Structure formats: C-alpha cells, structure tokens
Amino acid sequence: MSPSFDWNAGYTSRRLPVFARNVVATSHPWAAQAGLAMLQRGGNAVDAAIAAAAAMTIVEPCSNGLGSDAFCILWDGERLQGLNASGCAPAAWTPGYFRRKYGDQALAPPKRGWDSVTVP
C-alpha cells in the first residue's frame, strides 16, 4: 500500500504518524518519518524502531543516544517479549547509602555528581 502523503512536503509541520496499520511515535516528526520510511521499504516494527531511534540521536542529541534508556514490548507472532534496557543502579545504592551520605532528610538522589546517574 502506498502512503497517501508526500515525503517531500515543503514544511515540517505536516505530520501523519499512521502508515497502513502501523504507527511510529516519537517526540520529533523527522524521527517518526525515518521509522515510517523503514516500514515503507518493507521493514518490520523493530527495523522502524531502530531507524527512529537512530534519527533521534541526530534531531535531539542532548536527549537521546548511546547510554539512553530503552523499553520495548513486542509481539513476535508467537509470544510477548519485553525489554527493559534502562540503566541499573549499583547494588550499593540503597536508601541507607543515601541517608549516610546526604543525611536523614535526603528524599531523593542528588541532582549533580556521580550519585545522580545510572550505570548501564
């Protein structure tokens, strides 16, 4: 089935995230278009997700890229698959660790420094 929209529209505000029975949702229309282009060329949902994610590293480089978190729920035709590729915290990061380091009033990890990031 051929898409009913022009990939070369003269302005970027034209967005159509649905192509046939598929959808690509991103925070940037160009990344969504990359995923849709992959579907149009015969790719599957995983191919489209990879294309969209790769495009996101270009159009939103401060928010995406290597080291970012990824979550996926995928039906492979036979069973439901799940992927949680978020960074995990070190085993020593317990509530007691933060209380000892930052005091009993610490309600959350700090916003700066090594204790504010996850480790892949």
Image (cartoon, rainbow, N blue to C red):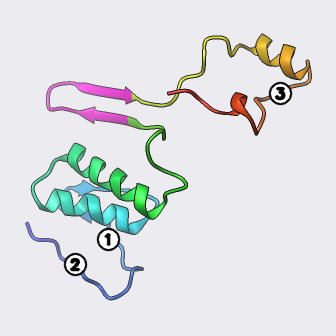
**CA separation, marks 1 and 2?**
8 Å
Residues packed near mark 2 inside 10 Å, few (<14), some (14 to 19) or many (20 plus): few
Looking at the image, tell me whether mark 1 or mark 2 is earlier in sequence order.
2
The type of residue carrying mark 1 is: Leu
| Residue pointed to by mark 2 | 5
What is the magenta segment's predominant secondary structure? strand
| Residue pointed to by mark 3 | 107
Residues packed near mark 3 inside 10 Å, few (<14), some (14 to 19) or many (20 plus): few
Give the camera-side residue of 116 and 29: 116
Looking at the image, tell me whether mark 3 or mark 2 is earlier in sequence order.
2
* Residue 5 pos. (x, y %): 22, 78
In the shown orientation, is residue 116 left or right of residue 24?
right
| Residue pointed to by mark 1 | 16
Q: Quadrant of residue 24?
A: bottom left
The boundaries of the magenta stretch are 72-83
Q: Quadrant of residue 79?
A: top left
At 59% from the left and 29% from the top, the residue drawn is 118
Q: Are marks 1 and 2 in contact (CB under 8 Å)?
A: yes
Q: Is residue 99 above or below residue 112?
A: above
Q: Secondary structure at mark 3?
A: loop
At 53% from the left and 52% from the top, the residue drawn is 63
